[in-house]
Image: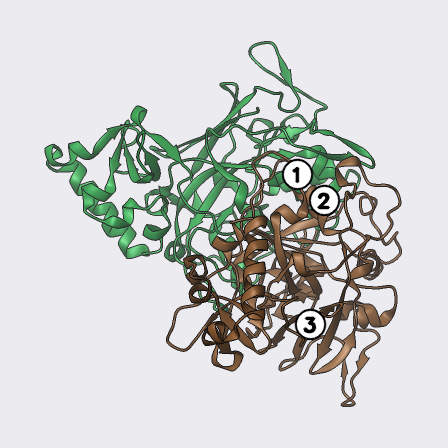
Chain colours: A brown, B green
Amino acid sequence: MSWGVDNLPYGVFSCPGETPRVGVRYGEKVLDLAPALHDEVFAAPSLNPFMARGRAAWHDTRTLIQNKLTGDLAVTERHLIPLEQVRLHLPFEVADYVDFYCSLEHASNLGKIFRPGSEPLLPNWRHLPVGYHGRSGTVVVSGTPVRRPHGQLGAGVFGPCAKLDIEAELGFVVGVPTADGSPAGALEEHVFGVTLVNDWSARDIQAWEYVPLGPFLAKSFATSVSPWITPLEALPRIPGRPQEPAPLPYLRRRADWGLDVSLEVLLNGEVVARPPYSGMYWTPDQMLAHMTVNGASLRTGDLFASGTISGPSRGERGSLIELTWNGTDPIKLASGETRSFLQDGDTVTIRATAGDLTLGEVSGTVA
Amino acid sequence: MSWGVDNLPYGVFSCPGETPRVGVRYGEKVLDLAPALHDEVFAAPSLNPFMARGRAAWHDTRTLIQNKLTGDLAVTERHLIPLEQVRLHLPFEVADYVDFYCSLEHASNLGKIFRPGSEPLLPNWRHLPVGYHGRSGTVVVSGTPVRRPHGQLGAGVFGPCAKLDIEAELGFVVGVPTADGSPAGALEEHVFGVTLVNDWSARDIQAWEYVPLGPFLAKSFATSVSPWITPLEALPRIPGRPQEPAPLPYLRRRADWGLDVSLEVLLNGEVVARPPYSGMYWTPDQMLAHMTVNGASLRTGDLFASGTISGPSRGERGSLIELTWNGTDPIKLASGETRSFLQDGDTVTIRATAGDLTLGEVSGTVA
């Protein structure tokens, strides 16, 4: 089945009238972990306390759950709750949220659109994974309606965003902090798992506000994440994309941290793009190394995301601004409608698979 | 006295072997609030639970403390602990940290230095308070040593930052959240108090990394705040600086939120600058209105800072990059030494007063 014992992502759920707690998805059910494993860490309303336990505990717990689900199901069955009886919550408390800009194709496309006539890639891009801090207080779980933001669209111009966009990304959730001032260890010692991210973006607000300190209100109104955190351990790994020039020693890859994740972006149920994570230029081990090289520490609950995932072909672009080339070449939908950017009532769903594994989906409707 | 009943800032302290709790500074002592007021909210290791109670509670508590300190001191005295017996901690749990860029003189100076030959102020600057998200996990309390960051200083160049700088700022600490998607109310309903901020900055890292998404590692290694949060209620208010062009309606001032705060920057004990907060172009009510106009919500513990405070004369500049014009015109110290940027072992202290009130200081030594 598609949510089998090789998958087992973690989330936070509640039954009507009960407080949220940690569960694992198995098929179309949720395993209620606190009673199933007799461990109060799962009675918390977020994954943070469990994530802080570290890699050995993550592995042992996963093995324990796999054994329970493949052993005498009569014992475990009473802790399996049908999905339709539960509500899913934001699975972790977000500490700091960093968004990167790791796709060569995405950065090139946006350079061409925002700075026409100049070199699309800025001089630093091939030397470091460019990133910035986002707003952690407005990270919301899949299903949360997204309000169209109002803001400044130019000098003296105020109104609702007319270029509401999405960004299809993969997010990495930190379990184990890094020590103050010491470089982070291997990725798998710190990162608990991955989530799908939709970094909603107001392109007209962004174009006016973003110099010189970067995107602010164009992004801070909402960032949606998928409810199920796939353990890093479960993901198939592949070599990262070759890099030229070779990165500085602190950014050199010591293991294969390319991830063979294939995404689909659906607009009102229709697939409009298939972004391939496997082609990303900067890999998550490099993001982690960069983020901490200056001595900055990470905390349990930190979220760092890849930035928009775009491949070289048009159908592989992870944002509408790229898919429609800033609205100049609208998408034609099967319904006969066209879209440059999002209209009120539109639903965007990003879903992903990694080999046989599903990563589920992150979905949101423009209110 | 300089920390009298008109001041009464809040902080978090601990005595040896005890857990941190909330206190109020009075003279050279700390009033231990939980036992003095019989209120367990002050037994928390951060100001957040108290700050969440809201403006009426802040006012009533302040009045209660003033009455206790001006009444029968025999009763209160046993809850007054000499400062030298306590350790001061980060006074609040930082939710999101936003840094603005509100000084016309600072933005103009940095424009001239970073983009010589072009118009120093970018087109958006007079239309909105430019801001960006910083790293909340590396906000530290005054006295915490600051490690010189390493990082990329150009294409293929890695090493210790050679242009380590400070930024003298005023920070606003949010007590009461704003509702999702509804515009924030008046500043005094949300902001509990102010803190002094030193936004340590690595100028060489910043110059290379900051396009197009803004400062990241140049700022994320440390941001220091003063240990005593001065209640907003205690601060003398003055009209804000005139603005041309008139801001959009959502940014219009409805009350006087200029603050008559005078800062001093000391390098190894010697005053090197006296930045005047009173001349800031964008006032904190405008920062709050801007930050939330897109529907973004604020949480208890959010910190938003003014950006570097610089006045028109050289002696009023709140950063070394401005004081030394990017190192081309070093400061001469009384010791005979000169400084372009910070050297290891240097101590920077930012202190401030508002009329008769002291706001204390934020200090840090480069380790």
Q: Residues within 10 Å of mark 1 (few under 14, many from 20)?
A: many
Residue at 44% across / 64% down in the picture?
A34
Residue type at numbered disc 3: Ile
The residue to which callout 3 is attached is: A350
User: Is any atom of residue B112 visible in this view?
Assistant: no
- The answer to whether marks 2 and 3 mark residues whose Cβ atoms lie closer than 8 Å is no
Secondary element at tag 1:
helix
Mark drawn on residue B210? 2
Q: Residues within 10 Å of mark 2 (few under 14, many from 20)?
A: many
Q: Quadrant of the C terminus of chain A?
A: bottom right
Residue at 60% across / 39% down in the picture?
A296
Residue type at numbered disc 2: Tyr
Mark drawn on residue A276? none
- The answer to whether marks 1 and 2 mark residues whose Cβ atoms lie closer than 8 Å is yes
Q: Quadrant of the N terminus of chain A?
A: bottom right
Residue type at numbered disc 1: Ala
Residue A357, above or below B92? below
Secondary element at tag 3:
strand
Q: Earlier in the sequence, mark 1 or mark 2?
A: 2
Image position, residue B111 (x, y; %) = 71, 41
Residue closer to the observer: A274 or B317 = A274
Please state the chain letter of the residue tagged with numbered disc 2 in the rendered image: B
Residue closer to the observer: B44 or B297 = B44
Mark drawn on residue B218? 1
Please state the chain letter of the residue tagged with numbered disc 1 in the rendered image: B
Residue at 66% across / 56% down in the picture?
A233
The answer to whether residue B103 is left or right of residue A335 is: left
Do the dots labelled 1 and 2 sit on one chain?
Answer: yes
Image position, residue A319 (x, y; %) = 75, 68
How far is the residue under mark 1 from the one under mark 2?
8 Å
